[in-house]
């Protein structure tokens, strides 16, 4: 909001646009302004993937990924924290949202980390840092990835492939930080009795089908919107196969409401970003800033990149 306010002030008081011209350019220009590319992407792609994440969380399908993370990493040094990092990575694969990631796994992992001996601020920081990585963890990445695909013209499927290496490296860095902190404080892993069994995980292996469908469809050339719709449909159908994941009428209504509420902050952010982008385009500020940076660097593009 502060940046958007500064952008409006620059257009009116520095560049000299009238309120009428600025309002027309901000609200009625198709490719810039409030209803520009960011809000168009959020209404077509981002909302569907956020709804997909909400469906998985509300039907408890997302809990499968938490259990898988604890089964794999829970028994090692600093196991609860490592499991929290792994769970955030797996949740990030299906949510693409740091907030949804934290809500889905943090309420469960943070108390376990504190109980295992991690200091409260370390437990909270670990979950927040790991959940942030959910925004660029393939295959379902955050809003920025969809906007990036729209602006650059690079297919979303290619952006997924490009992110395959840096995203795991991010989580590896968080995992190493947790490991050394646990070593320094002598914190061990969880006992086997507290970990879900491989047998129970195997019985729920079909719950990854929605994610497999989305990955396959996007890599096969289908649009992200169609892939998301098929993923939502598959998750909804699978939810009726088990009592623990089945939703009644009230549960379905609340799930749809949660999907809308989850999307609102993202939509507001995209609209605000459109105001800034529209100001940069309509006033020529972007060209002037780019030219000034190149002049300061005296034409050294390597210096500009730094």
Image (tube, rainbow, N blue to C red):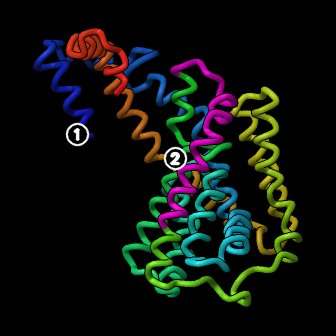
Magenta stretch prevailing secondary structure: helix
Magenta segment: 151-177
Rounded to the nearest angstrom, the CA distance separating label 1 from label 2 is 21 Å
Place residue 277 in its image quadrant: top left
According to the image, label 1 marks what residue? 2
Q: Position of residue 165 (x, y in %)?
A: 63, 42
- Toward the left, the furthest residue is 13
Q: Is residue 156 above or below residue 263?
A: above
Q: Is residue 155 magenta?
A: yes
Q: Position of residue 267 (x, y in %)?
A: 46, 40
Place residue 46 in its image quadrant: top right
Q: Is residue 20 above or below residue 61?
A: above
Q: Position of residue 208 (x, y in %)?
A: 80, 56
Considering depth in this image, is 261 or 135 the residue closer to the camera? 135
In this rendering, position of residue 234 left or right of residue 225:
right
Q: Is residue 80 magenta?
A: no
Which image quarter holds the C terminus? Answer: top left
Q: Residues within 10 Å of mark 2 (few under 14, many from 20)?
A: some
In this rendering, position of residue 15 left or right of residue 111:
left
According to the image, label 2 marks what residue? 263
Residue at (60%, 32%) from the top-left corner? 44
Residue at (73%, 64%) from the top-left corner? 61
């Amino acid at each position: 909001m502060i940046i958007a306010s500064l952008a409006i002030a620059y257009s009116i008081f520095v560049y000299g646009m009238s309120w009428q011209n600025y309002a027309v350019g901000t609200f009625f220009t198709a490719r810039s302004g409030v209803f520009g590319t960011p809000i168009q992407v959020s209404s077509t792609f981002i909302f569907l993937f956020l709804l997909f994440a909400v469906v998985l969380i509300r039907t408890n399908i997302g809990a499968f990924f938490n259990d898988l993370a604890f089964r794999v990493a829970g028994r090692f040094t600093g196991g609860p924290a490592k499991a929290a990092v792994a769970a955030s990575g797996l949740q990030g694969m299906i949510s693409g949202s740091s907030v949804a990631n934290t809500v889905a796994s943090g309420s469960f992992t943070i108390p376990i980390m504190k109980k295992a001996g991690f200091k409260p601020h370390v437990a909270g920081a670990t979950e927040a840092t790991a959940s942030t990585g959910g925004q660029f963890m393939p295959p379902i990445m955050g809003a920025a990835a969809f906007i990036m695909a729209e602006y650059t013209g690079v297919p979303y499927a290619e952006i997924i492939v490009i992110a395959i290496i840096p995203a795991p490296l991010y989580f590896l860095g968080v995992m190493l930080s947790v490991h050394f902190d646990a070593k320094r404080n002598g914190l061990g892993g969880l006992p086997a009795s507290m970990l879900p069994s491989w047998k129970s995980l195997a019985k729920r292996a079909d719950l990854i089908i929605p994610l497999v469908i989305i990955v396959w469809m996007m890599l096969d050339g289908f649009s992200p919107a169609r892939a998301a719709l098929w993923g939502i449909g598959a998750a909804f159908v699978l939810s009726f196969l088990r009592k623990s994941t089945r939703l009644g009428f009230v549960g379905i209504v609340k799930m749809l409401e949660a999907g809308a509420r989850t999307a609102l902050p993202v939509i507001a952010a995209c609209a605000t970003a459109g105001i800034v982008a529209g100001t940069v385009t309509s006033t020529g500020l972007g060209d002037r800033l780019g030219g000034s940076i190149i002049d300061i660097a005296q034409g050294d593009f390597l210096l500009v990149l730094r």
